[in-house]
Image (cartoon, rainbow, N blue to C red):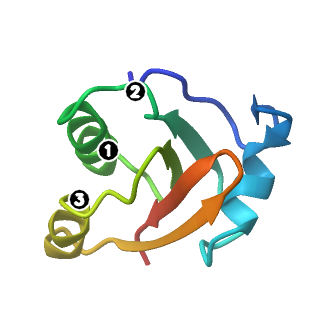
Amino acid sequence: MFGDTAQCDRTELSGMDAETLRAATTAPADRSCELLDARELPPPEPLQRTLEWAADANGAVLVQVNDRAPQHLYPRLTERGFEYDTAETDDGVVTAVWQE
């Protein structure tokens, strides 16, 4: 549904697994997570796909990898009651999204 998604413990991105990407943020480590590689998606697809995921998150964490911080996404996540944290890594800008 979101392009490249997978369980955190099985996905690799440039040699770095998604669990390591999630660990670069303050996202809860005790939840399942999905990976969205948005680096090659044109705007506004990363925002749209993340909000689609948020509508059916079911307690999971979304780890989005992009080429920049998703500034337009932050207020929309806040409006919907989601937490997020962004960190820069060698693979790109990683934003983890979850709901408390």
Q: Quadrant of residue 6?
A: top right
Note whether 77 is above or below 7 in the view shown. below
Q: Quadrant of residue 74?
A: bottom left
The residue sitting at 45% across, 65% down in the picture is 98
Instruction: From the image, tell me which residue sits under label 3.
Output: 73
Amino acid type, callout 2: Phe
* Comes first in the chain, label 3 or label 1: 1
Q: Which mark is residue 2?
A: 2
| Callout count | 3
* Comes first in the chain, label 3 or label 2: 2
Q: Residues within 10 Å of mark 2 (few under 14, many from 20)?
A: some
Q: Tell me: 92 left or right of 41.
A: right
Q: Residues within 10 Å of mark 1 (few under 14, many from 20)?
A: many
Residue 57 placed where, x, y %?
39, 50
The residue sitting at 34% across, 42% down in the picture is 53
Instruction: From the image, tell me which residue sits under label 1.
Output: 50
Residue 58 placed where, x, y %?
43, 52
Amino acid type, callout 3: Leu
Residue 5 placed where, x, y %?
55, 29
The residue sitting at 18% across, 60% down in the picture is 72
**Does residue 16 show up?**
yes
